[in-house]
Amino acid sequence: MAGLLAWIVPGLGHLFIGERARGLAILITISVTFWGGVAIGSVRDTVHPQIRKAWFMAQICTGSHALISYKWGQAVRSVPASPDDDTLAYWKSVETAVVYTGVAGLLNLLAILDAITRADPASQRVLATTRAARTRGAR
Amino acid sequence: MIGVLAGFFLTPLPLSGFQHALLLLPLSLSISIVYKAVRCTNVRDIPKAALALWVTIVVGMYAVAIGLWLLYRLFA
């Protein structure tokens, strides 16, 4: 459940298991990174599975953000662009935007796995034992 | 209001080469914050640890970039 929530909205998985500060940090950081990327390259071409399949696999890890951006981009693309259309991105801006949104997705994948681990009591016991062993080793 | 906000996402930013290099700063800050939010046991340690990681990434990446640029200038 925590993993699913973390995929739908980044950070929500941590908020669900009671990790408020951690969840808010993840929510704000990933959302700002994703939409900052979209603002750099425009919504038209940033999330485009037909052109960039591999990057789309990373972007879709942000869940609702990627789906909203994809749907919005589809709506914008359905209107044919004229050569002097200012919604057409310069290629460098699109590349930067794709990296920003892709990295946001991969960071959320990390957050999803962390939320799943923190929600599972068995994993928590293993982590606590490992940390205790490390602390004893450091001494 | 909504139109102005939507316009912000519809028009791409015309960025120059130097401005692209500066975009490394916010991206590496995001990576540092999320990575440390996942790794740190105590939430209070996150800001300090994220800042240290951010500085390390930025210094490392710009050092590699300067090194590669110098190599290019040397052999070009």
Image: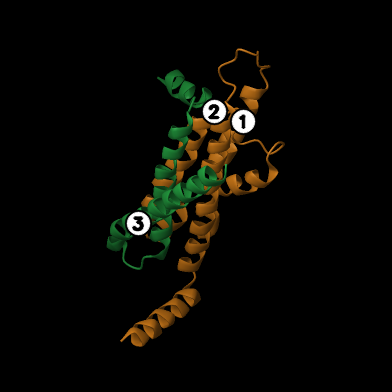
Chain colours: A orange, B green
Is there any visible trace of residue A26 in the rendered image?
A: no
- Specify the subunit that label 3 lies on: B
Q: Amino acid at mark 3?
A: Ala
Task: Answer with left or right where residue A103 lies relative to residue A16.
Answer: right
Marks 1 and 2: in contact by CB < 8 Å?
A: yes
**Whole-number angstrom distance, CA of label 3 to CA of label 2:** 29 Å
**Could you say where residue B47 lies in the image, as x and y percent from the top left?**
30, 56
As displayed, is residue A101 above or below residue A92? below
Badge 1 density bin: few <14, some 14–19, many ≥20, Cα 10 Å? many
Marks 2 and 3: in contact by CB < 8 Å?
A: no
As displayed, is residue A73 above or below residue A87? below
Badge 3 density bin: few <14, some 14–19, many ≥20, Cα 10 Å? many
Which residue: 37% across, 83% down?
A132
Q: Which of the labelled discs sits on residue A45, or is there none? A: 1
Which residue: 54% across, 28% down?
A42
State the residue position of label 3.
B50
Q: Nearer the viewer, residue B47 or A66?
A: B47
**Mark 3, secondary structure of its residue:** helix
- Specify the subunit that label 2 lies on: A
State the residue position of label 2.
A42
Which residue: 39% across, 60% down?
B36
